[in-house]
Image (tube, grey):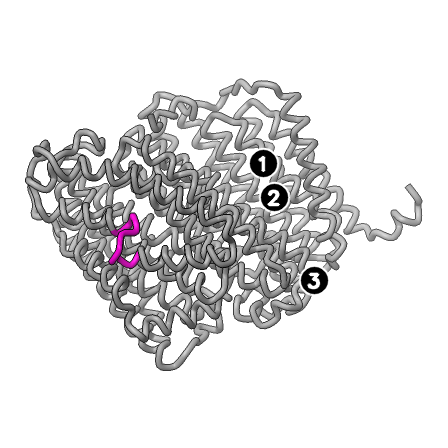
Amino acid sequence: MIELAFVLAAPFATALLLALFGHRRGAAEINSAGSLLTLLAAGFLTMRVISEGPMTLFDQQFFVDPLNVFLIALTALVGFTTSLFSRPYMRVEHDHGRLSAARLRLYHSMFQMFMCTMLVALSTNNLGILWVAMETATLTTVLLVALYRTPASLEAAWKYFILCGVGIAQALFGTILVYFAAERVLGHEGGALLWTHLDAVKTQLEPTVLSLAFVFLFVGYGTKTGLVPLHNWLPDAHAEGPTPVSAVLSGLLLNVALYAIIRCKVLVDGALETHFAGNLMIVFGLLTVVVPAFYLSRTKDVKRLFGYSSIEHMGLITFAFGMGGPVASFAGLLHMTVHSLTKSAIFFAVGHAAQMAGTQIIDDIKGLLKQSPTIGWGLMLGTLAILGMPPFGVFTSEFMILTTAIKYYPWATPILLTALGVAFAAMFGKVQGMVFGEPSVQPLSHNPALLPVFIHLGLVLMLGLWIPPYLADWYRQAARLIG
Amino acid sequence: MNPSLIHAIPLSGQVINLCAAIMLLLGFAMLSQRRVLTLINLFMLQGLVLFVSTLIVALTTGQSHLLWSAGLTLILKVFALPYILHRLIRRLSVKWDIETLLNIPTIMLIGIALVVIAFNVAQPISQLSGTITRATIGIALACVLLAFLMLITRSKAVPQVIAFLAMENALFFAATSATYGMPMVVELGIALDVMVGMVILGVFFFQIREQFDSLDIRHMERIRDE
């Protein structure tokens, strides 16, 4: 109980503290310390759940089970490493005169607030609070995306706000419908929005209402996951915000939105006893894998490139959860983990590369390897990992997804393989040009923090070669929960 | 209509149905309104109708938390948000702005089609509902879709935000008509989000105008993949 309180209170308190002192010299250190505290609390919470099993807390408003505790741990970990990366990154931005001290204060405070809202969204038992937390996450990230106040960043933030605000309003209507269906079974006072209660009575919920509710919830949270055709905000928001924000958007926020969909899917599957929700996810998942693959080759901005790649991977995970079953759900969870780790590592490397080159245009970044071998190798290895090269973990999860698809949905396999092939060709060529060749880049004014990049890639490599037994067991439990 | 049918609905139910009809009418009025100032007043009126209907549901059903919800609606949607919007358009000096809306008749026709769709979609839910306001679920959904349409057809920042807020109004209306309102903690959270969002956007307006010399979103559209 005390662990979860710490997980939620640490980022919130840090956000308040940084709202006051975020412009002072030690702000980046406070930011990292707060994130470290969150990570430690999340670690203890995880150990508690492993030893004692799922639990509900705080008058049943919060709960932790194998599915969300693994995402809480992942969120806290990536939040911490991103705060480490952000320290030198933001100093360089400050030196270049792109950010004033007041903006840095806003950045630090909102970064922690954003972490807090994601952790609330993951741990809450109340579907209404889940919605509120997702909306607050949107608001904090709108501020972060618009941090530079350039025309392009304002446009990206506006697009992000309008698209996600509208999308998430649909999710609210879906939540109202779920509440409506649940109220008839659970009564008015019985906590009809609490997920654990809903899960207990899911077979009695009205199927017509729940299927309608799922459509709205899927559109709503799907917008935030970046599913095609409502993905337009994502590349802009990734390209125009500061890079640490791109890293947490890709690595964490998309996962949290997908988590919301999965939670709702469990309820709908119980009520419907058909594969309606799964089919919806398969179709839109496939679409989301295919469409961005063809945008990749046309992209000129390196952060947009990896933004599109994130959309593609979200599509793949949605497809995996849509298929369902122990293997596909296991693969989906594994892919969530490795994508989150790899993509944030890539953004760390890309951030410093763009700072060295003074631009985000791919053609103008050359010879990273000669100027700074660590950044060059970090970017190259990260790209190979995200493209699904063995022995990295992405290969393992993609292999599992593909083999399941061959068995149950053979028609989808060639589509997936083509999209992955096109993505490989487009991205590898572009990254090769950035890494090799004669340098066009300048060294940085502060030493880059590249430890996070290699920690992440090391973890991804480990997950590709050997998944620790307790982690595998944990994934299996979560996969059983999803069904 | 058969007179006995009218008697079957109690007075409170009839008033709520009236409110729902006014909501829908206001939805159409906002869809075709070109003046920013009038748009804000229409939005305020919509908030007022929402307040009245929530209050009547609260009084007739004795759901005490709905009273709080009605109070929240009154403070937020009738006073606070319109006040902020009025101040904003005064300080941005867009008070007398008139937006050029192309094809108002076409937009209205699409709106009518949306209402028909909304009624069809809401049909199964209305039949299941036991609340006194069940007939209004279709109207609530129609209002959501109309606000959505308004958001798509507008190109200026302030009307877009009003459309967003109108959508939120319609969602609240849906919640009261289908289920007698969401739990209090959720409603408070949503209200807080709307409030914070409004403040953030208010700051945004100034920055957008500073950067683009206009609040017209069409001036943006610079980011593109070549």
SS category of the residue bearing label 2: helix
Alpha-carbon distance for marks 1 and 3?
31 Å
Q: Amino acid at mark 2?
A: Ala
Residue A308 is situated, as x and y percent measured from the top left of the image, at 35, 40
Residue B67 appears in the figure:
no
Residue B79 is situated, as x and y percent measured from the top left of the image, at 53, 41
Image quadrant of residue A164?
top left
Q: Amino acid at mark 3?
A: Gly
- Disc 1: which chain? B
Residue drawn at x 40%, y 28% is B91
Name the residue that disc number 1 marks: B147
Q: Nearer the viewer, mark 1 or mark 3?
A: 1
SS category of the residue bearing label 3: loop
Mark toward the start of the polypeptide (1 vs 3)? 3
| Neighbour tally class for label 1: few under 14, some 14-19, many 20 plus, Cα within 10 Å | many
Name the residue that disc number 3 marks: B62
Q: Amino acid at mark 1?
A: Ala
Relative to residue A449, is residue A41 drawn left or right?
A: right
- Disc 2: which chain? B
Q: Which residues are magenta?
A: A385-394
Contact, mark 2 vs mark 1 (Cβ under 8 Å):
yes
- Disc 3: which chain? B
| Neighbour tally class for label 2: few under 14, some 14-19, many 20 plus, Cα within 10 Å | many
